[in-house]
Image: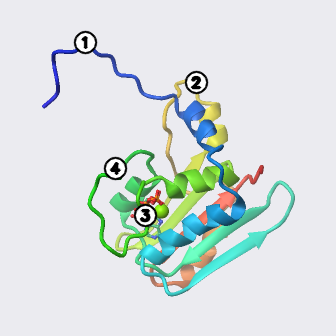
Amino acid sequence: MVPHHFKSRNAPPKASAMVEALRGLGYNVQTALADIIDNSIAAGASEIRLEFHWAEDRSRISCLDNGSGMNAAEIDRAMRLGERSPLEERSPTDLGRFGMGLKTASFSQCRRLTVASLGTDGLQVLRWDLDYLASSPDNGWHLLEGPAPGSEEHLNSLSNVKHGTLVLWEVLDR
Ligand SMILES: Nc1ncnc2c1ncn2[C@@H]1O[C@H](COP(=O)(O)OP(=O)(O)OP(=O)(O)O)[C@@H](O)[C@H]1O
Ligand SMILES: [Mg+2]
């Protein structure tokens, strides 16, 4: 029940300010990748492939796993911040706890996070772009659909698995 005896106002954070602040949580590239790998292990992956591609401002890091993958609803939920409460019950094999690691670890290292997953709904791709959020005058949480224009080919390695997830970090500014 919504308490009605206090006067209140809705006070959502500004998306861009919030994610820029989350970048300073104290990850380094090792601990950030460890969070991504935790998720792959929790998804039952038997193989995890990290790729580091250095090409100046087009550099990228990716993590491909052959875990269960996510369907459309799951990847939507996975990309949202503050979607899953730490108070929620978890399976004993789930290494996650806060519902934040994928986003906070990624934002600590890059300004563009693309997650592509092959699950029961076929290929699903969602993306956070901190530069897009910064340039959005409405301060909204604009979760983008599909890969960044020009980055489509970086998802190709997903076709090597029957099901699984690819986490792609681009615009590596750290
Ligand atoms: N590689 C993956 N394969 C399948 N599902 C994934 C993968 N990565 C993330 N997910 C899904 O996205 C959700 C959110 O991941 P995220 O790392 O943000 O939080 P968490 O793992 O639940 O908790 P924590 O903040 O402790 O890491 C996970 O709970 C999982 O359901
Ligand atoms: Mg996690």
Q: Position of residue 109 (x, y in %)?
A: 69, 54
The outermost residue toward the left is 1
The outermost residue toward the top is 7
**Disc 2 vs disc 4: Cβ atoms closer than 8 Å?**
no
Q: Earlier in the sequence, mark 1 or mark 4?
A: 1
Residue bearing the label numbered 4 = 85
Q: Earlier in the sequence, mark 3 or mark 2?
A: 3
Element under disc 1: loop
Element under disc 3: loop
Q: Residue at x 71, y 74 (%)?
A: 51
Q: Does any atom of ligand 1 lie closer than 8 Å to the CB of label 3?
A: yes
Residue bearing the label numbered 1 = 7
Q: Nearer the viewer, mark 2 or mark 4?
A: 4
Q: Nearer the viewer, mark 3 or mark 2?
A: 3
Residue bearing the label numbered 2 = 137
Q: Earlier in the sequence, mark 2 or mark 1?
A: 1
Q: Position of residue 11 (x, y in %)?
A: 40, 23
**Disc 2 vs disc 1: Cβ atoms closer than 8 Å?**
no
Per the model, the C-alpha gap separating discs 1 and 4 is: 25 Å
Q: Quadrant of residue 9?
A: top left
Q: Does any atom of ligand 1 lie closer than 8 Å to the CB of label 1?
A: no
Q: Earlier in the sequence, mark 3 or mark 1?
A: 1
Residue bearing the label numbered 3 = 96
Q: Quadrant of residue 4?
A: top left
